[in-house]
Image (spheres, rainbow, N blue to C red):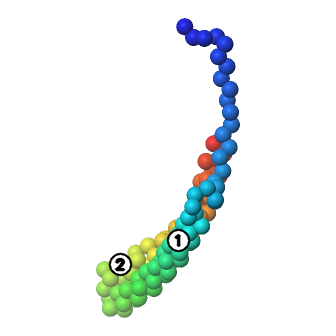
Amino acid sequence: MKPTNVHAIARDVNIEPNSSGLPGIGQLSTIVGASMTVGLILAVLAVIISAIVWALGSNSSNPHLAGRGKVGVLVGLGAAIVTGASVALVNFFWNVGQAV
């Protein structure tokens, strides 16, 4: 048998991100920002090297090398887009999750 006088009280849980809750959060934020900078520098380097490979492949009539250079340019540009948009993407999905 179930007790008849049990009242369930639904309470709202309000939890927000806390930038001072754990020690080292400031340093972690600095490390993530530095990682993003390194990622962007490497993406630019990949685009430059791939563009050179593409040019050499096209100039020497080597379609395989030219194709690899094209793919490398696209991968480098994609990496730069993902790295640059990572904060905006995380914030977007955070807001979508908060709306659920």
User: Residue at label 1?
Assistant: 31
Q: Nearer the viewer, mark 1 or mark 2?
A: 1
Q: Is residue 85 visible?
A: no
Quadrant position of residue 3: top right
Q: Nearer the viewer, residue 36 or 68?
A: 36
Percent coordinates x, y for residue 65 in the rendering: 32, 82
Kindly indicate whether the residue at mark 2 contacts the one at mark 1 (C-beta within 8 angstroms): no
Q: Is residue 17 visible?
A: yes
Q: Quadrant of the N terminus?
A: top right
Quadrant position of residue 75: bottom left
Q: Is residue 26 above or below residue 73?
A: above
Percent coordinates x, y for residue 38 in the rendering: 49, 77
Dot 2: within a 10 Å radius of its alpha carbon, few (fewer than 14), some, or many (20 or more) residues? some
Q: Is residue 72 above or below residue 3?
A: below
Q: Amino acid at mark 2?
A: Arg
C-alpha distance separating marks 1 and 2? 33 Å
Q: Nearer the viewer, residue 80 or 97?
A: 97
Q: Earlier in the sequence, mark 1 or mark 2?
A: 1
In the image, which disc is placed on residue 95?
none
Q: Residue at x 46, y 76 (%)?
A: 76
Which element is circle 1 on?
Answer: helix
Percent coordinates x, y for residue 35 in the rendering: 50, 73
Percent coordinates x, y for residue 87 in the rendering: 59, 64
Dot 1: within a 10 Å radius of its alpha carbon, few (fewer than 14), some, or many (20 or more) residues? few
Judged left or right of residue 17, residue 28 is left
Q: Amino acid at mark 1?
A: Ile
Judged left or right of residue 7, residue 1 is left
User: Residue at label 2?
Assistant: 68
Q: Nearer the viewer, residue 69 or 46?
A: 46
Q: Is residue 100 above or below residue 42?
A: above
Q: Nearer the viewer, residue 51 or 40?
A: 40
Q: Residue at x 64, y 55 (%)?
A: 18
